[in-house]
Amino acid sequence: MRVVVGGGTGFVGRALTQLLRSRGHQVTHVSRRGGKDRISWEELSHSGLPLCEAVVNLAGENVLNPFRRWSDAFCREVVSSRVETTKALAKAIAAAEQPPRAWVLVTGVGFYRPSPTAEYTEDSAGGDFDFFSRLVSSWEAAALIPGSPTRGVVVRSGVVLGRDGGAISQMLLPFRLGLGGPMGSGLQPFPWIHIQDLAGIVCHALEKESVRGILNGVAPSSPGTSNGTFAQELAAALGRPALLPVPAWAVRAVFGAERAAMLLEGQRVLPKRTLESGYRFIFPELPAALKDIVA
Ligand code: NDP
């Protein structure tokens, strides 16, 4: 199948592209930068969607970029890089003479209200209580194409754990030096997924005609993982101690209060529909996932 991937040059996109190509699919990226097997967002809006059977959107300004201050301008970029790219792809799908069969968007579990106790499935309510939950709502709304024959899937992802990017790349140095530890109280849930499983779920959603609607992109054991257990397991995988908690005030000082909430709070999320849809996780448990990443 020919697959067009917005933001396919990034951390998740590289893993997805590799998986799709290994399964015999052809991949074209939509990117702000030119290159082989790429088109620009301008080309997409002027010339329409290249002939393809499936579309994915992974584009988005990195929310946890510690080098960017949490300003109004940055907030607008975080929103528009997701909502506008999703709208552009949805519009191109709606206008395509031969519409693709599948359209997959990756958003986040920030849709669900952080809580130390509540457990959320794809049927749970959310999306209307803070900046990130409202972002997910407008992002997912931008993907809707009323009356379209194209099958739509949204994967709400937890923190993506992988070797060359994402949250772990920022944590590895302090943890290797034995300076890592839980953030804040460490009791907050830590919803996570191994990058191979997120790429696997997107690929499953593209290939399996019966999959549609929301799928939670978190490991099955993720509801039992707290930020503190994550810190302990990462330290154990590296053979280092995890003794030094990072105080909540320090996290707020680096990221700003709104973004710090993403690290200091969390959700227990179950991949109920994902499992029911027939997806089998490669890394359901944290120790094996971390061993694979840091080995
Ligand atoms: P990356 O930070 O790697 O970014 C993905 C791509 O988005 C980049 O390669 C870039 O493509 C494009 N992009 C970045 N900034 C902008 C911008 N301002 N305007 C337009 N395009 C931009 O993301 P990930 O691969 O980590 O994540 C993929 C998606 O999954 C994102 O939407 C993210 O919000 C979501 N997600 C990720 C999680 C994670 O832990 N990583 C957790 C939950 C959700 P190019 O330079 O080619 O234009």
Image: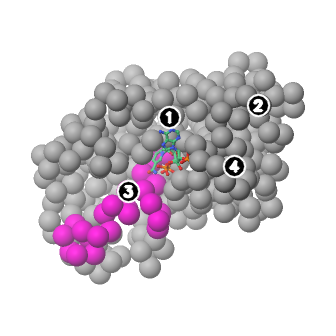
Please name the amino acid that badge 1 sits on.
Ser
At numbered mark 3, what does the secondary structure look like: helix, strand or loop? helix
Q: Residue under circle 4?
A: 38
Between the C-alphas of marks 1 and 4, the distance is: 18 Å
Q: Position of residue 55 (x, y in %)?
A: 71, 40
Q: In the image, which disc is placed on residue 81?
A: 1
Q: Nearer the viewer, mark 1 or mark 4?
A: 4
Between the C-alphas of marks 2 and 3, the distance is: 34 Å
User: For the residue with label 3, is its CB less than 8 Å from the closest atom of ligand 1?
Assistant: yes
Question: Looking at the picture, does residue 176 appear above or below residue 186?
Answer: below
Q: Quick check: 278 left or right of 261? A: right
Between the C-alphas of marks 3 and 1, the distance is: 19 Å
At numbered mark 1, what does the secondary structure look like: helix, strand or loop? helix
Q: Residue at x 70, y 34 (%)?
A: 44
Please name the amino acid that badge 3 sits on.
Ala
Q: Nearer the viewer, residue 9 or 194?
A: 9
Q: Residues within 10 Å of mark 1 (few under 14, many from 20)?
A: some
Please name the amino acid that badge 4 sits on.
Arg
Q: Position of residue 238 (x, y in %)?
A: 33, 77
Query: In this view, which residue lies farthest toward the front?
Result: 34
Q: Residues within 10 Å of mark 2 (few under 14, many from 20)?
A: some
Q: Nearer the viewer, mark 3 or mark 4?
A: 4
Q: Nearer the viewer, residue 7 or 38?
A: 38
Q: Earlier in the sequence, mark 2 or mark 1?
A: 2
User: For the residue with label 1, is its CB less than 8 Å from the closest atom of ligand 1?
Assistant: yes
Q: Which residues are magenta?
A: 157-180
Q: Residue under circle 3?
A: 167
Q: Residues within 10 Å of mark 4 (few under 14, many from 20)?
A: some
| In contact (CB < 8 Å): disc 3 and disc 1 | no
Q: Nearer the viewer, mark 2 or mark 3?
A: 2
